[in-house]
Image (cartoon, rainbow, N blue to C red):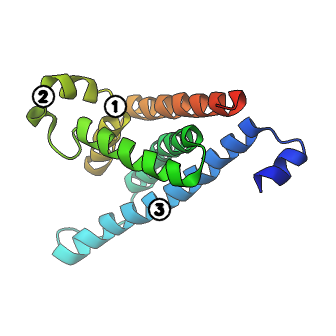
């Protein structure tokens, strides 16, 4: 498919950006389904509250877009760096494990050595964990959305730069 697009004058950078947009949509749909399932399923199972789809929950679904964009841009960057799908999957697995561990998602950051915990606060996974927690508790802010969009723009820019330079 990429070769057909390139023959028709579409650049590798435009193809990479299109991949990020499509992947953002797919990730957002999956996150929205999971979010809706959690917001409806948990109260229904435990009978803790009535099930009402409010404006706050609709805003939370919209707030999942920056998280989806940042994750999609990171995926595109890793697969661009790897060069092929097999190596991309291996790079994603290793990088994902490192980001989750250092970001305090697997073990709390207090249990990690300071040399890992301090830089781990600034990793995208730590930001995503805080943002998704804020979404669940209803304390999501514009600053968090801007952080996600910043990570997404950084990853998209790096991925497109590597596509442009054929690295």
- Looking at the rendered structure, the secondary structure element under dot 2 is loop
**How far is mark 3 from mark 1, CA to CA?**
23 Å
Q: Vertical placement of 83 versus 164: above or below?
A: below
Give neighbour class at mark 2: few <14, some 14-19, many 20+ (Cα, 10 Å): few
Residue 58 image point, x, y percent: 45, 55
Q: Residue at label 2?
A: 113
Write the residue at 17% across / 69% down.
48
Write the residue at 67% across / 41% down.
17
Give neighbour class at mark 3: few <14, some 14-19, many 20+ (Cα, 10 Å): few
Residue 135 image point, x, y percent: 33, 47
Write the residue at 26% across / 29% down.
120
Query: Relative to residue 79, is residue 32 drawn left or right?
Result: left
Q: Residue at label 3?
A: 30
Of residue 31 and residue 114, the one placed in the foreground of this image is: 114
Query: Relative to residue 102, is residue 11 drawn left or right?
Result: right
Q: Residue at label 1?
A: 123
Query: Relative to residue 100, is residue 145 drawn left or right?
Result: right
Residue 134 image point, x, y percent: 29, 43
């Amino acid at each position: 498919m990429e070769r057909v697009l390139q023959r028709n004058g579409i650049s590798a950078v435009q193809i990479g950006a299109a991949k990020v947009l499509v992947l953002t949509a797919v990730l957002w749909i999956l996150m929205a389904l999971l979010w809706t399932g959690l917001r409806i399923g948990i109260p229904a199972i435990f009978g803790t509250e009535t099930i009402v789809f409010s404006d706050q929950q609709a805003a939370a679904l919209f707030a999942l877009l920056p998280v989806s964009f940042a994750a999609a841009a990171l995926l595109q960057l890793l697969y661009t760096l790897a060069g092929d799908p097999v190596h991309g999957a291996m790079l994603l697995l290793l990088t994902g494990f490192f980001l989750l561990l250092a970001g305090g998602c697997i073990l709390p950051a207090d249990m990690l050595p300071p040399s890992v915990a301090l830089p781990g606060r600034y990793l995208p996974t730590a930001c995503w964990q805080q943002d998704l927690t804020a979404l669940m508790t209803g304390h999501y802010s514009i600053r968090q959305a801007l952080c996600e969009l910043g990570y997404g723009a950084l990853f998209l820019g790096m991925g497109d730069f590597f596509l442009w330079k054929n690295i």
